[in-house]
Image (cartoon, grey):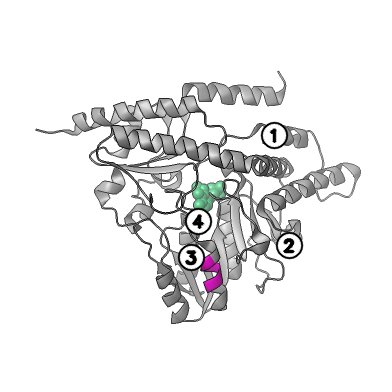
């Protein structure tokens, strides 16, 4: 069996036993990405070598950079390949945070932004303001304006779409306000890229982070978009051989980057169809669950959301018990990053949930390979798991 067939075969086998609704943790690899990676793995060259095989490797990287730029609506030269969005967020904040100015972030950011921002502040590098959110989890423009007016803001970092709820912030208005205050805008768009159209050439965004595995590329590859001519110092996290124009040293992960590029091209090609198909599946899932499960509600329901995400709070049904009661549904009780760490979702708490409500929240996230049959299965599993869990919790 050829390598790519074997990979597709094991993926299909895994999906046939489990309904996979955890795309926000990681989307299944797209066949185009797996094929591009295998092609690249057959090449022995280092993309920095001057010989023929090195040049072939660097051509694969150049092609991937162009494919990713096409998806984002930016130029290839504005992209720095990294090991993922965690590194891209760290690089963005460490590079563009103002020494002795004000860094503004939202309370619902991924830990890769929040923890880095807190570290920069505690190292005495800059001041930090953390913006609260409304009950849908969106940044309040009034609060942002007050923070922008309060000191000498130099960098604002607000996520484009939230990983736990799929709620989308109004980045155009936010970017316009940030620029009017003379500051720069970074956005963690890890969950938005490849799922919603983007045109960075026309957007008031200076830095943007992404991770390839969220749109069907491999894990461990990401990128930072850094707008050309940005007035920031040269502060790379990794120094060495000068790769990525000195912004990210280390031998390029050619196969991973090739996979990211192919995934970007496929996501771009199918974006409109997938957006419509996936949002219909998500809407059907929500409508069916809300009709069959009393006490269930959708978080962020009145805000714009990503097409494939639903965050459900189900009164009296703790998420860990619900997930254990439906072992053939791969879903999440909040974000994958915090679920292992036994911490309550800071996102849900910032949206005003009580501890109890946060504990009773599950996240189902769909994407490019989700089928009708999987959604039927999830609806039937979830609607039968909740009464069983509630009955087991009931103490007369
Ligand atoms: N930001 C967001 C919004 C995410 O959802 C994630 C992944 N959960 C990350 C950053 C980090 O991505 P990675 O783990 O691929 O570096």
Q: Is residue 245 above or below residue 332?
A: below
Query: Which residue in the protein does label 1 denote?
Result: 32
Disc 4 from disc 1: Cα separation: 29 Å
Q: Secondary structure at mark 3?
A: helix
Front residue of 344 and 358? 358
Front residue of 376 and 42? 376
Query: Which residue in the protein does label 3 denote?
Result: 117
- Residue 108 is inside the magenta segment: no
Disc 1 from disc 2: Cα separation: 30 Å
On residue 112, which mark appears? 4
Residue 298 located left or right of residue 219: left
Badge 1 local density, few (<14 within 10 Å), some, or many (20+)?
many
| Pointers 3 and 2 in contact (C-beta within 8 Å) | no
Foreground: disc 1 or disc 2: 1
Query: Which residue in the protein does label 2 denote?
Result: 246
> Residue placed farthest to the top in the image?
1
> Residue placed farthest to the left in the image?
396
Which residue is located at x 50 percent, y 61 percent?
Answer: 170
Q: Secondary structure at mark 4?
A: helix
Q: Is residue 193 above or below residue 5?
A: below
Foreground: disc 3 or disc 1: 1
| Pointers 4 and 1 in contact (C-beta within 8 Å) | no
Q: Can residue 204 be spotted in the picture?
A: yes
Residue 171 located left or right of residue 256: left
């Amino acid at each position: 069996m050829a390598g790519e067939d074997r990979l597709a075969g094991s993926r299909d086998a895994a999906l046939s036993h489990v309904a996979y609704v955890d795309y926000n943790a990681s989307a299944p690899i797209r066949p185009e990405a797996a094929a591009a990676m295998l092609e690249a793995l057959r090449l022995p060259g280092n993309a920095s070598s001057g010989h023929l095989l090195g040049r072939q490797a660097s051509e694969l990287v150049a092609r991937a950079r162009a494919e990713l730029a096409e998806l984002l609506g930016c130029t290839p030269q504005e992209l720095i390949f990294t090991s993922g969005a965690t590194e891209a967020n760290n690089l963005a904040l460490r590079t563009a945070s103002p020494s002795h100015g004000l860094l503004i972030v939202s309370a619902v950011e991924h830990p890769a932004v929040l923890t880095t921002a807190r570290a920069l502040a505690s190292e005495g590098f800059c001041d930090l303001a953390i913006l609260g959110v409304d009950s849908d989890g969106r940044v309040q423009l009034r609060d942002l304006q007050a923070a922008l007016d309060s000191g000498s803001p130099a960098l604002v970092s607000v996520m484009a779409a939230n990983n736990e709820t799929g709620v989308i912030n109004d980045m155009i208005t936010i970017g316009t306000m940030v620029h009017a205050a003379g500051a720069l805008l970074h956005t963690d768009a890890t969950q938005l890229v490849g799922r919603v159209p983007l045109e960075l050439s026309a957007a008031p965004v200076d830095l943007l982070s992404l991770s390839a595995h969220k749109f069907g590329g491999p894990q461990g590859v990401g990128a930072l978009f850094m707008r050309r001519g940005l007035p920031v110092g040269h502060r790379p996290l990794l120094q060495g051989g000068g790769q990525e124009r000195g912004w990210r040293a280390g031998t390029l992960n050619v196969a991973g980057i090739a996979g990211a590029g192919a995934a970007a091209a496929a996501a771009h090609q199918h974006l409109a169809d997938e957006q419509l198909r996936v949002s219909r599946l998500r809407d059907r899932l929500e409508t069916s669950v809300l009709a069959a499960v009393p006490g269930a509600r959708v978080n962020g329901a009145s805000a714009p959301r990503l097409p494939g995400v639903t965050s459900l709070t189900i009164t009296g049904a703790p998420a860990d018990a619900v997930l254990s009661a439906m072992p053939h549904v791969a879903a999440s009780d909040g974000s994958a990053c915090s679920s292992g760490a036994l911490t309550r979702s800071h996102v849900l708490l910032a949206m005003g949930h009580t501890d109890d409500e946060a504990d009773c929240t599950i996240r189902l996230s769909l994407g490019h390979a989700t089928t009708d049959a999987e959604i039927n299965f999830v609806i039937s599993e979830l609607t039968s798991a909740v009464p069983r869990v509630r009955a087991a919790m009931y103490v007369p």
